[in-house]
Image: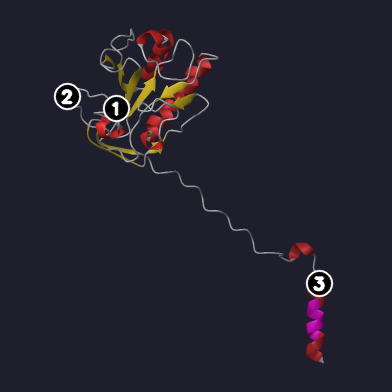
Amino acid sequence: MGRVRIAVLALALVLAAPASARPLQDPPVAPPPATAPPPSIALGKPYSHGRLVNGVQLPDFGDHHFTWDPIYNVAPNRPERRWGTDRLVNMLLRVFREYRDAHSGVQRVGVMDLSREHGGPFGKAYGGLGHASHQNGLDADVLYPRKDGLERRAYKPSQVDEQLAQDLVDRFIAAGAYRIFVGPRLHLHGPRKIVIPLAHHDDHMHVRIHNVATAQAPRTPPAAPASR
């Protein structure tokens, strides 16, 4: 009987305890801290033995941009043609946002090819003229704004709004572009070692950024630039 009384007394004490003193469930488990994605790495050269590690895909559409398939001439561009380094994609989105903030009501900026998901050759086997460069996530083909405001490719120089196109060129220069290849039949300009007229660029500018790893290495004389 003594043991029964002790057990009953213990149960009574538990039931009489305030609710705050009795855990109703296991304490919550804190989620693991979010980890940042690994940084992108551009290997090789844009035009030779290029590879892309941990690339970032440019969205097909955004508030300030659209993508355009240069082979089928439709929007959006195919997913496998829209990969770049995190630095390139972030720069593009930032420049597009600032450009449209400065020009209320203008059409979004069009983007054609960047690189393939893991980089590598992007030549004629992938359609059209192909690209000699675009191999390691540092290149992007950006469409010129059209005079008529349509969100599509400008098929001839007379359709290009050169004033808005020049503003985009200036913004890419300010953002740190290493090369900008432009159409020889347009009148776009900038520092001569950065803004370079090149055939097959009357419908788009080809923007290339520095590779951070090689930009910090000792300078060597650059090879002849390749585009497309």
The crowd level at tag 1 (other Cα within 10 Å; few <14, some 14-19, many 20+) is few
The crowd level at tag 3 (other Cα within 10 Å; few <14, some 14-19, many 20+) is few
Compute the Cα span from label 1 to label 3.
80 Å
Which residue position is annotated with label 3? 15
The region drawn magenta spans 6-11
The numbered mark, 1 or 3, whose residue comes first in the sequence reads 3
Residue at image location 25% in from the left, 35% down from the top? 121
- Indicate which label's residue lies in the foreground, 3 or 2: 2
Relative to 133, is 53 above or below? below
Residue at image location 63% in from the left, 58% down from the top? 28
Which residue position is annotated with label 1? 128
Image spot of residue 208 (x, y percent): 31, 25
Q: Secondary structure at mark 3?
A: helix
- Quarter holding residue 209: top left
Q: What amino acid is labelled 2 in the image?
A: Pro
Image spot of residue 70 (x, y percent): 36, 26
Which residue position is annotated with label 2? 221
Relative to 9, is 53 above or below? above
Q: What amino acid is labelled 1 in the image?
A: Gly
Q: What amino acid is labelled 3 in the image?
A: Leu
The crowd level at tag 2 (other Cα within 10 Å; few <14, some 14-19, many 20+) is few
Residue 135 left/right relative to 80:
left
User: Which quarter of the rendering shows the N terminus?
Assistant: bottom right
Compute the Cα span from label 3 to label 2.
83 Å
- Indicate which label's residue lies in the foreground, 1 or 3: 1
- Quarter holding residue 57: top left
193 or 59: nearer the viewer: 59
205 or 40: nearer the viewer: 205
Q: Secondary structure at mark 2?
A: loop
